[in-house]
Image (tube, rainbow, N blue to C red):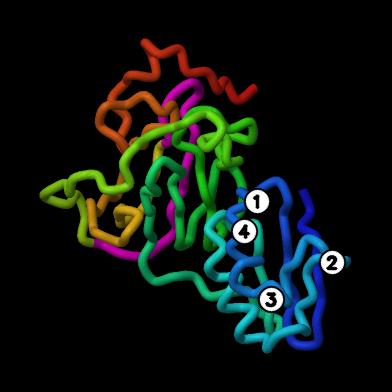
Amino acid sequence: MRRKEYTGEEITVTFDLKRCIHARNCFLKLPQVFDPAQRPWVQPDNAPAEEVAALVRTCPSGALGFRKDGAEEMVPTVNRISVLENGPLAFAGDVATDDSDAETRVTLCRCGLSKNKPYCDYSHVEGGFQATGEPKPVTPPTTDERGGTVKTFRIPNGPLKVEGNIEITSGTGMKIANHSTAFLCRCGLSKNKPYCDGTHKAGGFSDPMD
């Protein structure tokens, strides 16, 4: 799906509705620029370009993006997966999902209920998904390397395979583990979240990816 673009004098904001998890982060922090009640709902010139860019960088789902001075936003040095309390996996870094191009931010479902897999669509709220955002640290790490492209692949009817140098943190930023490869639960049933423990088989999790 092509992103919609909102062009200002110094910055262009892009938006992908299918990726939005409606966290309202943009409206709550910069309502003069991001206001669903106005048309167009994004007005980039209503705040300094640097302020708009800083806000867009906090969009957890990657639904919002920007171009400034002809350049895309910078890729974070450390690839990070934040495990959100009762919610999704928030990726930040150089992340390619399935066969898509690499992005700097993406939020992936871990409750098994999203209708837009692998992306989160906030179904965890309606479904009452409960899972800690503070899993216990894993030692020792499987890698100390940082950076580089991270690729994520959905295994049909199974977990999310992550390949590349990643740091997994709690939702509050505590380091959980470093990995070069990890299999993460996306059925919502694992007893070892955020990792897969094979429970998706007995639980009948279905995402055939046809």
Residue 38: give x, y in percent of width and height: 84, 66
Residue 10: give x, y in percent of width and height: 75, 87
- Near mark 1 (Cα within 10 A), the count class, few <14, some 14-19 or many ≥20, is many
Foreground: disc 4 or disc 1 = 4
N-term-proximal mark, 1 vs 3: 1
Residue at disc 2, secondary structure: loop
Q: Magenta stretch: give its range.
A: 145-160
Q: Which mark is residue 24?
A: 4
N-term-proximal mark, 4 vs 3: 4
**How much space separates mark 1 and mark 3, taking CA atoms?**
19 Å
Instruction: Depth check: give the residue in front, 125 or 183.
Output: 125
Quick check: 155 left or right of 140?
right
- Near mark 2 (Cα within 10 A), the count class, few <14, some 14-19 or many ≥20, is few
Say if 7 sits above or below 165 in the image.
Answer: below
Q: In this figure, which residue is indicated by the disc labeled 1? A: 20
Foreground: disc 2 or disc 1 = 2
Q: Which mark is residue 38?
A: 2
N-term-proximal mark, 2 vs 4: 4
Q: Which mark is residue 67?
A: 3
Residue in view at x 61 percent, y 78 percent: 53
